[in-house]
Image (cartoon, rainbow, N blue to C red):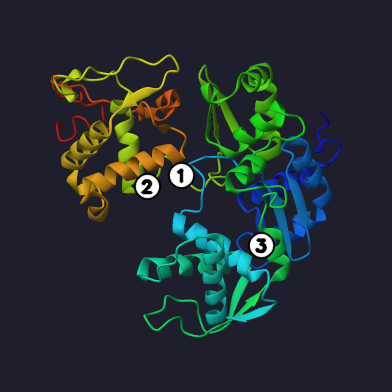
Amino acid sequence: MKDVLDGLSDIDAANVVRCARVLLRRPLLRADGPDGDLLPLVYRHRTTLQDLFAGLLAYRLVVERRFARLYKPGPGVDPTRGEPTLSPRGYTYFALTVAALTGVGRQVLLSRLVTDVRAAAVEAGVAVTDDLPDRRALTSALRHLLSLGVITETEGTVAPWGTDGPAEALITIDTDLLGQLLAGPLLEATGPDHLIELAARPGPRGAEHAVRRKLVENPVVLQTDLPPDQVEWLRRNQRRESGLLERSFGLITETRLEGVAVTDPEDYLTDVLFPGSGTVARIALLALPELIADPDPELFADDVEPPEPRPDGRHPVTYGQVRMICAQLVEDYPAAWSRQATEDLDRLANDVLDLLVRMGLAVDDPDDGWLIAPTAHRWVPQPDDTPARNAPPPPPAEPEVPGWSLFDGEGEL
């Protein structure tokens, strides 16, 4: 496969890699949005970038003066993906709002848009309750569209409304961005499940594109999660892929027996930092040694046998174990944590598990419960120094022997 960076000067190659990283992080890049100052550079190198994404990942890139849109195929059924600001209900309203916006022109009153969204919900068979959680979900969908630049508040605001309905506002729609928003092949899909299946199709090179997409988009890729043809391809090409991903996207790969961990030294190509500085992230990190240790029989009831080791290297744990470990850490270091994050231990345990799932370090298996990935060993914290216990104190320093001085013997004359 030809490297599109060959033949470029060092400066141009570095700029292409910089633009590629921005597009991976901001698939919808706008001049007035985050990292928008790089849009002119993206436009300048658009042909090289289009060849880079098409060849390596089979991603389609559209570049205009006002925006750039990188079309990433969907990951399929993947609990680690999703905009964290939107709940499942928020996602539903997001899709309904996009559908409603396609037929209203360039401007619409908020009250009219809300009516159209609810009409679309009825047509799609989605129940509308019009209670406070329902209104918040619709508001979060509208605010997400605001953050994407698809709609703007020309007059008024889409802030949450009371029982009398939304406060009136005039909304302007960027129809060009709206047309670039959806990435799934809607015309080919016969239903939601079929759409997810179509969106997750591999590129024209099959296993090569499928595996490389996983390496670029996921922090951990386990061989046990790949079909046999992809495992074989990765084993044959993992050394070449390591150099290719570093040269093209600045990513560092660590290949181990069970799979590949991919890191970004600049922590830019991730929406979840791990290890992190928050309470949940630090507790999750400190919990890993116990979660991947051999099961302690005392943690199980008398009539329950500890789980046997799995051939895929994953460590089975129970929710009760996670909660117990979290409780112990909170008790041992009470001043180290946010009180808001630790006052509810059940919520804390769920937050820790959710973070590990998003990092690819845990899965919720319907048959075997929670499973910790063997790659979690990489993140086990190691102390910088371990002080010796019960060690004798160091001996006192020997007194300094005074040296000879020019004034020795002064006063003896």
Residue type at the position of mark 3: Gly
Q: Residue at x 49, y 61 (%)?
A: 126
Q: Residue at x 19, y 34 (%)?
A: 410
State the image coordinates of residue 324 (x, y, percent, origin top left): 20, 35
Q: Quadrant of residue 316?
A: top left
Q: Residue at x 43, y 14 (%)?
A: 311
Q: Residue at x 76, y 61 (%)?
A: 40
The Cα–Cα distance between marks 1 and 2, rounded to whole angstroms, is 9 Å
Residue type at the position of mark 2: Ser
The Cα–Cα distance between marks 3 and 1, rounded to whole angstroms, is 23 Å
> Dividing the image into 4 quarters, which one contains the C terminus?
top left
Q: Nearer the viewer, residue 120 or 9?
A: 120
Check contact, mark 1 vs mark 2: CB within 8 A: yes
Q: Which residue is mark 2?
A: 277
Helix, strand or loop at mark 1: loop
User: How busy is the neighbourhood of tag 3: few (under 14 within 10 Å), some, or many (20 plus)?
Assistant: some
Q: Which residue is mark 1?
A: 273
Q: Nearer the viewer, residue 391 or 29?
A: 29
The Cα–Cα distance between marks 3 and 2, rounded to whole angstroms, is 28 Å
**Numbered circle sitting on residue 36:** 3
Q: Is residue 213 above or below residue 92?
A: above
State the image coordinates of residue 117 (x, y, percent, origin top left): 55, 70
Helix, strand or loop at mark 2: loop
Residue type at the position of mark 1: Leu
